[in-house]
Image: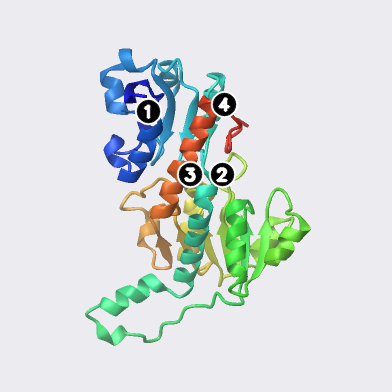
Amino acid sequence: MGDQELPGVLILGVGGVEGVLENHVGLLKKNFHLITMKEFLENKKELSEKIKSIFIFERRPTIDRGLLESLPNLKVIANSGVGVDHLDLKLISTFGVKVTSTPQAVSDSTADTGMALMLASARRLVEGCQIAVSPDTERFAVDWLGVEVTGATLGIIGMGRIGYKVAKRAKAFDMKILYHNRKRRKEEEEQAVGAIYCKKMEDLLQQSDFVMLVVNLTPQTHRLIGKRELELMKPTATLINISRGAVVDQDALVEALQNKVIRAAALDVTYPEPLPRNHSLLKLKNIIITPHIGTATVQATCMMTEEAITNMLAVLNGLPIPSEVCPK
Ligand SMILES: O=C(O)[C@H](O)CO
């Protein structure tokens, strides 16, 4: 089949197809005729009917009514990654378009990121690096203590696929694991990682040395952690966020970190991303911020592309869809 006969996929991300890693382009090209947004906008008349799917491979592009109306044969929007808070699922479903995500591909790398942030914050690795290379050698390993992860209590808020993988890893650190989730896990799943269910999030917040946020961003989890929740945490506790920035009230977090209501925070996600350069969070010492790199590994990005391709082909061929996101 010639390239032009393959189903058209509109590629959305920074830099068009050039921004997609080389091996991903290869994988996509085997199955699809790739069309960038630039090409589409330059040649809407010819291309709009050809586009059957949209592949979102990075960042969070807006898919609005105008775009949906201009693609009469669109069947599927395949998102790389598991968070779909950037998509208006209800609007998309009114066009009869399916949305898919890549939960299999992202969970290990995101769980690893959570562990990395917890360890880095506990042992003050970023400050340590700065001191090790500083011209002020007087500061080398002086008066400078972190806290231990081993044996500490970890509270996981959101015990889906990623939260559970975090628990598995934390077990190897002999951590006491508490979790809060809408739905309690099966007893055998709890036992396998030694996790204890906290029906009330407040109980988890009061008892944990490290609180890790692993929830999806939904209206229910928007600003889930605010002033009240931060004040419930131990003054020695650390907040780690690997979900979405808007799950935390950032003004309340700034205040809590300034006033030592909690020890520290480690965030892979903020609101907005990136933070404006004059944002108060960037001025604090007891914080680590990484640029939303939860899934940024060679392996995870390859797997995301593969998973997205499988999803797109399933929709286009009328097969069961491995990772469909339900509109509600
Ligand atoms: O949603 C996800 O899986 C990650 O945040 C990557 O966007």
Name the spot of residue 67 as percent of width and height, x first: 40, 21
Way the structure is coloured: rainbow
Q: What element carries label 4?
A: helix
Q: At numbered mark 1, what does the secondary structure look like: helix, strand or loop?
A: strand
Judge whether residue 152 can be spotted in this image: yes
Q: What residue is at 39 percent from the left and 68 percent from the top?
A: 285
Q: How many labels does the image show?
A: 4
Mark closer to the chain start, 1 or 4 = 1
Distance, label 2 to label 4, CA atoms, is 18 Å
Figure quadrant of the C terminus: top right
Kind of residue at badge 3: Gly
* In the foreground, 181 or 7: 7
List the residue tagged with mark 4. 90
| Label 3 near ligand 1 (CB < 8 Å) | yes
Closer to the eye: label 2 or 4: 4
The answer to whether residue 40 is above or below residue 247 is above
Q: For the residue marked with disc 2, what is the amino acid?
A: His
Q: Mark 3 sits on what residue?
A: 81
Q: Distance between the residues labelled 3 and 2?
A: 19 Å
Q: Tell me which residue sits at (30%, 35%) in the image.
A: 16
Q: Residues within 10 Å of mark 1 (few under 14, many from 20)?
A: many
Q: Which residue is drawn at 63% across and 63% down?
A: 155
- Residue 206 x %, y %: 66, 65
Q: Name the residue under label 2.
A: 222
Alpha-carbon span between mark 3 and mark 1: 17 Å
Mark 1–mark 4 CB contact (< 8 Å): no
Which of the two discs, 1 and 2, sits closer to the camera?
A: 1
